[in-house]
C-alpha cells in the first residue's frame, strides 16, 4: 500500500513548476513597494506589541501581506541554498549612510550575507510562526504578551527586504 500524504501548504501558483528565488523576489516587488512593505511591517509590529490597540487596516490586506511575506521568506531561503552558484557583489566605493539603511557596509557590498545570517538564526517555519503571531496580535486586543522575542525576527525581515531590493537592483544593471 502506498503511503499517501495530504499536502496542506497553500499553493500560490496555478501550475506545479519550480521557481527560482530571484523570480519570486521580482514578483514580490512587482506587487509590493519596498517603502510600503517596510511601513506595513513596522505598523503590524507596533500594533502587535500594544495590548489595548489593534491595527485599523482591513484584515484581508494584512492577511495578504502576511502571505506575500511568507513567500518572500521562502524566496530568500531558495537564494541561500543556491548561493554557491551565484554571488552578487559590488565594487568597493564610498557609500553614503542613506543608502545603507539597516545594512552594515559589509552587508551592503555582499547582500546575501543578510539572508545567510537570518537563516542561521531562524528557520523558515520560525519566520512563518513569527509572521502569524505578529498578525494575530496586531488584529485584536489581548491580555498576554507574545511568548517569544519578536524584535530580532522583525529586524531580520527588514534587513532582508533591503538586501533583496539591492540584489534585484544590481541584477537589473548587469
Image: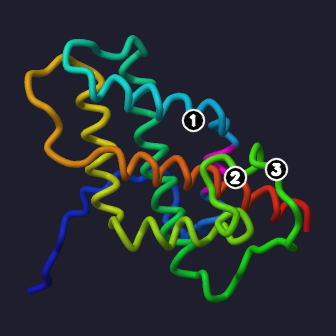
At a point 83% along the width and 71% down the height, the residue shown is 90
Residue 127 lies in what quarter of the image?
A: bottom left
Instruction: Mark 2: give few (<14), some (14-19) or many (20+) Cα within 10 Å.
Output: some
Q: Element at badge 1?
A: helix
Relative horizontal placement of residue 52, taking residue 35 as reference (left or right):
left
Residue position for label 2: 165
The N terminus is located in which quarter?
bottom left
At a point 9% along the width and 29% down the height, the residue shown is 144
Q: Is residue 116 above or below residue 29?
A: below
Label 1 to label 2: alpha-carbon separation: 11 Å
Q: Which mark is residue 173?
A: none
Pinpoint residue 70: horizontal percent, then vertical percent.
42, 50
Q: Main secondary structure of the magenta part?
A: helix
* Front of the two marks 1 and 3: 3
Pinpoint residue 143: horizontal percent, then vertical percent.
8, 22
Q: Earlier in the sequence, mark 1 or mark 3?
A: 1
Q: Earlier in the sequence, mark 1 or mark 2?
A: 1
Residue position for label 1: 37
Label 2 to label 3: alpha-carbon separation: 17 Å
Which of the pair 127/45 is nearer the observer?
A: 45
**Residue extent of the magenta highlight:** 25-29
Relative horizontal placement of residue 6, taking residue 66 as reference (left or right):
left
The C terminus is located in which quarter?
bottom right
Residue 19 counted in the magenta span: no
At a point 13% along the width and 81% down the height, the residue shown is 3
Q: How many marks?
A: 3
Q: Which mark is residue 96?
A: 3
Amino acid at each position: 500500500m502506498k503511503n499517501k500524504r495530504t499536502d496542506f501548504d497553500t499553493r500560490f501558483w496555478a501550475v506545479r513548476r519550480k521557481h527560482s528565488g530571484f523570480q519570486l523576489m521580482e514578483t514580490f516587488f512587482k506587487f509590493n513597494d519596498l517603502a510600503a512593505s517596510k511601513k506595513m511591517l513596522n505598523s503590524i509590529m507596533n500594533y502587535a506589541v500594544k495590548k489595548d490597540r489593534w491595527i485599523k487596516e482591513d484584515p484581508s490586506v494584512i492577511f495578504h501581506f502576511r502571505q506575500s511575506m511568507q513567500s518572500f521568506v521562502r524566496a530568500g531561503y531558495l537564494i541561500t541554498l543556491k548561493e554557491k552558484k551565484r554571488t552578487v557583489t559590488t565594487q568597493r566605493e564610498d557609500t553614503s549612510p542613506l543608502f545603507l539603511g539597516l545594512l552594515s557596509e559589509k552587508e551592503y557590498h555582499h547582500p546575501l550575507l543578510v539572508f545567510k545570517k537570518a537563516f542561521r538564526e531562524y528557520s523558515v517555519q520560525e519566520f512563518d510562526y513569527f509572521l502569524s503571531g505578529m498578525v494575530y496580535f496586531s488584529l485584536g486586543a489581548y491580555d498576554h504578551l507574545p511568548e517569544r522575542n519578536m524584535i530580532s525576527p522583525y529586524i531580520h525581515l527588514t534587513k532582508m527586504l533591503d538586501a533583496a531590493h539591492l540584489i534585484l537592483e544590481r541584477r537589473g544593471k548587469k
